[in-house]
Image: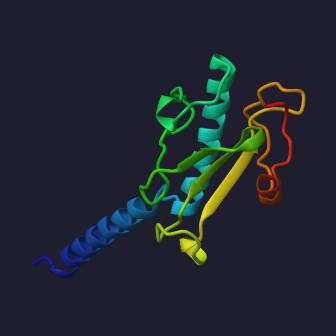
Amino acid sequence: MKSKIPAFKMIWLLAASAATTILFCCFLDTVPPRNLTEARMWGLKRGILRFAREHDRLPAELSVLPQMAEFSNSTKDGWGREIKYEIGANFIVTLTSLGSDGSPGGDGEGRDIVKCFHAKTPEGDWAGELSPWCLEAEKEEGVTAGPL
């Protein structure tokens, strides 16, 4: 007569394996919303500057950006809200997410994510897609990035 213990162990091992697989899949490739937002902002910056070089102007809105195979092309932050796009003085472009709480300011995950960049070089050419983000002080002070 065969013992029922090996069958029970087999069922238990299969159930444990299935549970482990499910848990692994749930956490596989999960990107925190703040990180996803910052990655999308990098992609948007590249798309904005690519558009500017192709059309010799900044886009009026993010929906007209060219699709880029190497990026998600989403204009939403990691919490599913549209990333705010502003063109300031001296061709300083600002991208803003209001964080997890969707309200200005906030702390921790709720704090805003604000990135700005100079769309034009000091010589008046469109900046390269890999140009650095500017400092918040530059945006506030309106530092000249090139001719208007």
Q: Quadrant of the C terminus?
A: top right
Q: Residue at x 89, y 33 (%)?
A: 122
Q: Residue 87, relative to residue 14: is it above or below? A: above
Query: Residue 146 location in percent, x, y?
Result: 85, 33
* Protein image colouring: rainbow
Residue at point 20%, 78% (across, down): 8
Viewer-nearest residue: 139 or 7: 139
* Residue 92 appearing in the image: yes
Instruction: Tell me the residue at 76%/36% (across/down).
Output: 130
Give the tally of numbered discs. Answer: 0
Q: Give the percent coordinates (x, y) of residue 107.
A: 59, 78
Q: Is residue 26 found left or right of 83 in the rendered image?
A: left
Up-down relation of residue 15 to residue 36 (above or below):
below
Q: Which quarter of the rendering shows the N terminus?
A: bottom left
Specify whether residue 32 is in view. no
The image quadrant that residue 127 belongs to is top right
Q: Residue at x 79, y 44 (%)?
A: 132
* Frontmost residue, 131 versus 119: 119
- In the image, residue 59 lies at what x, y percent? 58, 30
Q: Residue furthest right?
A: 123
Q: Quadrant of residue 135?
A: bottom right
Q: Position of residue 79 (x, y in %)?
A: 44, 60
128 left or right, relative to 46: right
* Most foreground residue, 138 or 135: 138
Decide: is 148 above or below 137.
Answer: above
Q: Quadrant of residue 20?
A: bottom left
Residue 109 located left or right of residue 2: right
**Residue closer to the observer: 102 or 77:** 102
